[in-house]
Amino acid sequence: MKPLTVEDWMNVDNFSIEDRSWNMMMQKVASFHSKFDFDNPENRGHDMGYRIALTVEELGEFAAAITKEKPLEEASEELADILILVLGHSLALKVDLFEQFCIKLEKIMNRPSIQTKLGIRVTEYKNE
């Protein structure tokens, strides 16, 4: 199956029980991209350098909400911003993120875990 474009996501109307939430989220992000014409090169909405900078900014806002012990609602909003950006990255790159998510999750489910000074890590990396 070929990855869906913003326009493809905009026209998705049949959701299976299994992937209904994913498709609904992708369709909403595609609608946002369409509304502001992100795909237009003049708008740079799909420029990955710009998108990465926005992601770093949102990660900083999320970190500040956590480290400054702001209300959960503020941290939740920042986390939603990050998710919207990540889903948008998959649209910009035309990556089937659901498929990649499933592949990666299967891979990491088979990895060992190690205890580090900072906490548990699920990784192929070995502490020396």
Image: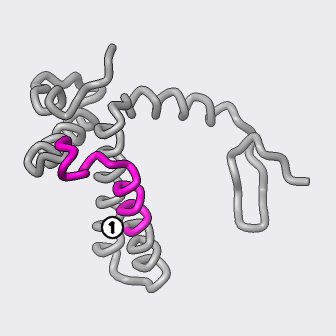
Who's the residue at 28% across and 67% down the image?
77
Question: Residue at label 1?
Answer: 78
Vertically, is 37 above or below 77? above
Instruction: Report x, y in % for residue 45.
Output: 24, 51
Q: Is residue 23 left or right of residue 111?
A: left
Magenta span covers which residues? Answer: 39-57
Q: Amino acid at mark 1?
A: Glu
Q: Which residue is farthest front?
A: 42
Q: Quadrant of residue 51?
A: bottom left
Location of the C terminus (image quadrant): bottom right
| Left or right: where 37 falls relative to 93 | left
- The spot of residue 50 in percent (x, y) is 35, 57
Q: Position of residue 102 (x, y in %)?
A: 47, 29
- SS for dot 1: helix
The image quarter containing residue 58 is bottom left
Q: Position of residue 72 (x, y in %)?
A: 34, 74
Residue 90, relative to residue 8: is it above or below?
below
Residue positioned 23% across, 38% down in the render = 26
Q: Residue at x 32, y 44 (%)?
A: 87
